[in-house]
Amino acid sequence: GQSLEQPSEVTAVEGAIVQINCTYQTSGFYGLSWYQQHDGGAPTFLSYNALDGLEETGRFSSFLSRSDSYGYLLLQELQMKDSASYFCAVRDEGGRRALTFGSGTRLQVQP
Amino acid sequence: GAGVSQSPSNKVTEKGKDVELRCDPISGHTALYWYRQSLGQGLEFLIYFQGNSAPDKSGLPSDRFSAERTGGSVSTLTIQRTQQEDSAVYLCASNPGTDTQYFGPGTRLTVL
């Protein structure tokens, strides 16, 4: 079966940097994605890593280590609007592209 | 352009009734997915459609759940004889063949 582990909750202050970790166990692996979901909203895509290393998109970066079955999302210069739930998700089959999601990390940004 | 749309946004039903949830994917997206999200939880895969291929139904929790996709576009998820444990947000997503899934706003289903 597949499983993903991520912290349930993280708290940080405006302007700070926060890292959300994700470890996974899957039968197959094609890539690790991150999605953001505000309360009552739809998940929105943040990043996708298929290869080892760091991907940077503005204030957000995502890292993957396939040998360690581990990745993280790094959020810099935190803003109040970053308060949301963040989900890591694994694409575990080549053709289907359906995702297996973690339970989510609720980030609270405080002033 | 228009995103993924879902209707209704909220549905309250009585236990034992049937419900139909609708999804309009982004035009031109060949892949369509249904997920379910219970309160405070991650998303649970239900079913996947790709073009004209037979759907992948491996995530459907019971035979009370079924889905159709007509003309490669609109999809309907049907839940028969609803149970209280079916209460959740049902999310539809589409993608054009990349690794980005575009989600609709979801339908919040409450079974009384």
Image (spheres, coloured by chain):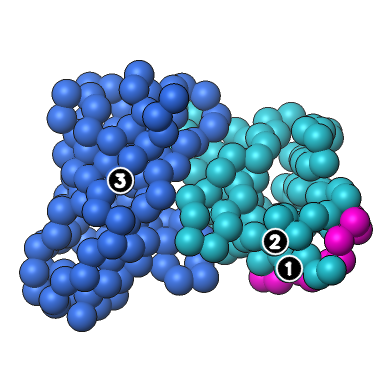
Element under label 3? strand
Q: Distance between the residues labelled 1 and 2?
A: 5 Å
Magenta residues, start to end: A8-17
Give me the chain letter of mark 3. B
Asked if both marks, 1 and 3, belong to the same chain, the answer given is no
Residue at which label 3 appears:
B6
Query: Residue A46 location, x and y as percent?
Result: 65, 40
**Colour of chain A in the rendered structure image:** cyan
Residue type, numbered disc 2: Ser
Give me the chain letter of mark 1. A
- Is A14 displayed left or right of B75 in the figure? right
Residue at which label 1 appears:
A108
Neighbour tally class for label 2: few under 14, some 14-19, many 20 plus, Cα within 10 Å: many
Tell me which corner region of the image, top left, top right, bottom left or bottom right, holds residue A67.
top right
Element under label 2? loop
Residue type, numbered disc 1: Gln
Residue at which label 2 appears:
A83
Whether label 1 touches label 2, CB < 8 Å? yes
Asked if both marks, 2 and 3, belong to the same chain, the answer given is no
Query: Is residue A29 shown above or below B90?
Result: above
Question: What label does residue B52 carry, if any?
Answer: none
